[in-house]
Amino acid sequence: MADLKLTLESTITCPECGHVAVETMPTDACQWFYECKSCGAVLKPKPGDCCVYCSYGTVPCPPIQAGNSCCG
């Protein structure tokens, strides 16, 4: 089995104010909450998504990239 090259940086966009930030995603856990650095809104995953990166980021979280379910 080949080693997977995971992308750990994702650009997350706040749906409240449009602020954009490049963040490094955790590899060992899902991130269920994210506080916007501009307006302070606390983002939560959209229904059906496992984490804020899958909902608001440009790259899905590492477990999804690896083809696994995220956060079981």
Image (tube, grey):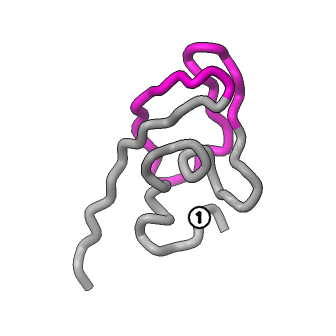
Which amino acid does the dot numbered 1 rest on? Answer: Cys
Query: In the rendered view of the protein, which quadrant contains the C terminus?
Result: bottom right
- Residue 49 found in image quarter: bottom right
Taking the image as shown, residue 59 lies to the left or right of residue 35, namely left
Using the image as rendered, state which of residue 29 and residue 7 is in the foreground: 7
Residue 71 in the image: state x and y as whole percent.
Answer: 63, 62
Using the image as rendered, state which of residue 44 and residue 71 is in the foreground: 44
- Residue 62 found in image quarter: bottom left
* Relative height, residue 51 to residue 19 (above, below): below
For disc 1, the marked residue is 70
Q: Please, which residue is most extreme toward the bottom here?
A: 1
The residue sitting at 57% across, 25% down in the picture is 18
Decide whether residue 27 is among the magenta residues: yes
- Residue 32 found in image quarter: top right
The crowd level at tag 1 (other Cα within 10 Å; few <14, some 14-19, many 20+) is some
Please provide the residue range marked out in magenta: 16-43
Taking the image as shown, residue 43 lies to the left or right of residue 62, namely right
The residue sitting at 67% across, 37% down in the picture is 33
Query: In the rendered view of the protein, which quadrant contains the N terminus?
Result: bottom left
Residue 17 in the image: state x and y as whole percent.
Answer: 63, 20
